[in-house]
Amino acid sequence: MSFPSPWQELFDYSSKSAVGNTDEQTRTLEYAAWLADYQNGRLSTGITAISELLDDAISADRVDGVVAVNICGLLAAMAGLSVQLATVSSDANSKLANIIAIRETTPPATCSHPLIIQG
């Protein structure tokens, strides 16, 4: 049995959030915003740890220049992913705010039924 990747879910959320009723969209957007923030926190922790290790290794003259350049390239790619995650979170939160604003400004539905006597 294969479980969906949380990363794939994050980048597919916009197509999922456009489908279904408002409650379903709200849940999808809330989950996407939470997951993007959570994964971004994990990613930021990793970037910090790698940066500190690299700094210590360079200070101790234990890292070859080519290795340091490659690690810096990896850190730059991770930072780019972090920006993408922040964009996903911001986009999901913006869409959620729009849904909430529409709910607050839309009057409740009224219905009439032929068997109900209106006073």
Image: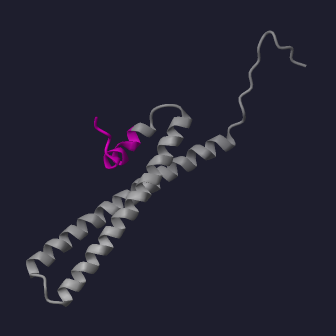
Most extreme residue toward the right is 119
Residue 90, given in percent of the width and then of the height, sits at 46, 56
Left or right of residue 42: residue 69: left
Q: Residue at x 32, y 50 (%)?
A: 7
**Would you say residue 81 sits in the magenta stretch?**
no
The image quadrant where one finds the C terminus is: top right
The one of 98 and 59 positioned closer to us in this rendering = 59
Most extreme residue toward the top is 115
Q: In which quarter of the view is residue 52 placed?
A: bottom left
Left or right of residue 100: residue 80: left
Residue 81, given in percent of the width and then of the height, sits at 30, 60
Q: Is residue 100 visible?
A: yes
Q: Residue at x 81, y 9 (%)?
A: 115
**Would you say residue 10 sits in the magenta stretch?**
yes
Q: Residue at x 47, y 42 (%)?
A: 28
**Taking 34 as reference, is 76 above or below it?**
below
Residue 48, given in percent of the width and then of the height, sits at 32, 74
The one of 84 and 28 positioned closer to us in this rendering = 28
Left or right of residue 45: residue 76: left
**Taking 75 as reference, is 89 above or below it?**
above
Left or right of residue 41: residue 2: left
Q: Main secondary structure of the magenta part?
A: helix
Most extreme residue toward the front is 1
Q: In which quarter of the view is residue 65 placed?
A: bottom left
**Taking 90 as reference, is 44 above or below it?**
below
User: Magenta residues?
Assistant: 1-15
Colouring used for the render: one colour
The image quadrant where one finds the N terminus is: top left
